[in-house]
Image (tube, grey):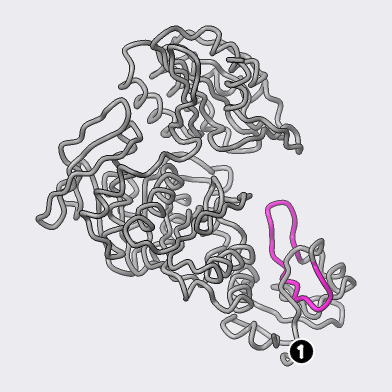
Amino acid sequence: MKLRNLLEKVNIVSVASDLDMEISGVCYDTRALLPGNVFVAIKGFETDGHKYIDAAVKSGAACVICEIAPFEEISYILVEDSRQALALISAAWFDYPAEKLRIIGVTGTNGKTTVTSLLKSVIEKCTGAKSGLIGTSGIMIGNDEIPAVHTTPESLELQKLLAMMVDKGCEYAVMEVSSHALELSRVHGIEFEVGVYTNLSQDHLDFHGTMEAYARAKSKLFAISQKSAINIDDDYAAVMLEKAAGSRFTYAINNDSADLVGKNVKLLSDGISFCALMIGDLVRFGLPIPGMFSVYNALAVVSAAFLIGLDMKQVSEALPMCEGVKGRAEVVPTDSEYTVIIDYAHTPDALEKIITAMRGSTASKVITLFGCGGDRDSTKRPLMGEMAGKYSDFVIVTSDNPRTEEPSAIIADILEGVKTAKVPYKVIENRKEAIFWALENAQPGDVVILAGKGHEDYQIIGKEKFHLDEREIVAEYFK
């Protein structure tokens, strides 16, 4: 492909290159660069791609896309925003795959993974069309699964995945859209048919700084969506509605002014049931995942399904047949008289929701085991400790992914909150030992919640990733 074709939609400041040269590929990491590639210098979390321009040229880069003009006499294109340029160049390289798919994006702090997974399933059951999925727990092209590194991949990888979906015959793509992806232009240039907002609670403040900045980042999805589905029970809904450029559709449980309102909600031990009142129509829906949060997730799915034109009767028949998502209120098979739940809850709000959901399903004790990630927002640690202490009967504080922080320091932050609730607790730093202790001490009828890891099958200590799958640990204990 000629360089000028790659740059068709890019906002260029100046050109110091032959626009008719042939390009062999697109790259933003010199370790993966091949001769003839365009190298796009982007600013990352730990380093700046502009530092590696010399290395890229020595490795055979045909042209460099950058925001700062190089001192050397090399072939380069100066742009205003190299991250946006990478997104647009990547789309061009893969022949604009997003334009060939009906794309639904879901953003919010909690619920994204469940909503996207359920929506993919509902679309396929109702239409028979093949669909793709991009999110935290993995990437799916039809029934084929690919591991995920980021909730929303970098724009080059994202466009490649969308192209694979097109090649494999997908008509729809459902994706989680993280605040990082929106702030870092990973989805720049993509027009979403529907954007869905679930909720906002404290998370990622190490990156965004304030809740207001976090909300503004999330709201960017609705500026690039033809239609928006917004949960107006959430405190930050107004920020999302204000940014929505297309048509706006709202859902709620507590606000009767919403376009879709959940009524007659029934919380069951093995799922939920509710009536959806929408434009004079009343349809009953069910979902085999317990908790009030599941009602909101179901309403988000129903809203998106309505906006892409699915028949509500078919949706009501499809939703109860959908399976739960790995690591989201996942019941682990055990040879015991108590229940073990694995859940990804890693924010104060998510932890409160899973504990209160399980509280409603047992008359016995709720035992919550959790930790907090290192090198991440430390201000939420005592808040998570407070939530666990407030709603649990017993708390076990352990390690999550400590990364480069000392696990004991992270635990100390958590205990500030746990102690305010005056709940019995125990500290066991080693996560496997902590799980064994919880299983050893649980009594018939209790619910043991293993929170924070969810779908993850690893633990990051220092900068190394070690295998750790809580399902395997539970199975090992019962052996």
Image check: 255 left or right of 344? left
Residue at x 60%, y 57% (from the top left corner): 153
Identify the residue shown where x is 60% and y is 79%.
92
**Disc 1 residue type?**
Met
Give the image quarter of residue 354. Answer: top left
Q: Quadrant of the C terminus?
A: top right
Occupied quadrant, residue 469:
top right
Which residue is painted at 82% across and 61% down in the image? 31
Above or below, 324 relative to 133: above
Tell me where the magenta segment starts and ends, as one range: 33-49
Number of residues whose C-alpha sits closer than 10 Å to that of mark 1, classed few (under 14), some (14–19) or many (20 or more): some
In this view, the residue in front, 15 or 373, is 373
What residue is shown at x 60% (from left), y 14% (from top)?
436
> Left of 242 or right of it: where is 253?
left
Measured along the vertical axis of the image, is residue 176 above or below residue 451?
A: below
Judging by the rendered image, the residue that carries numbered circle 1 is 21
Q: Decide whether the magenta segment is chiefly helix, strand or loop.
A: loop
Whether the magenta-drawn stretch holds residue 262 is answered as no
Give percent across and percent down for residue 358: 37, 23
Residue 147 in picture, x, y percent from top left = 62, 49
Q: Eyeballing the image, is 161 above or below 234?
A: below
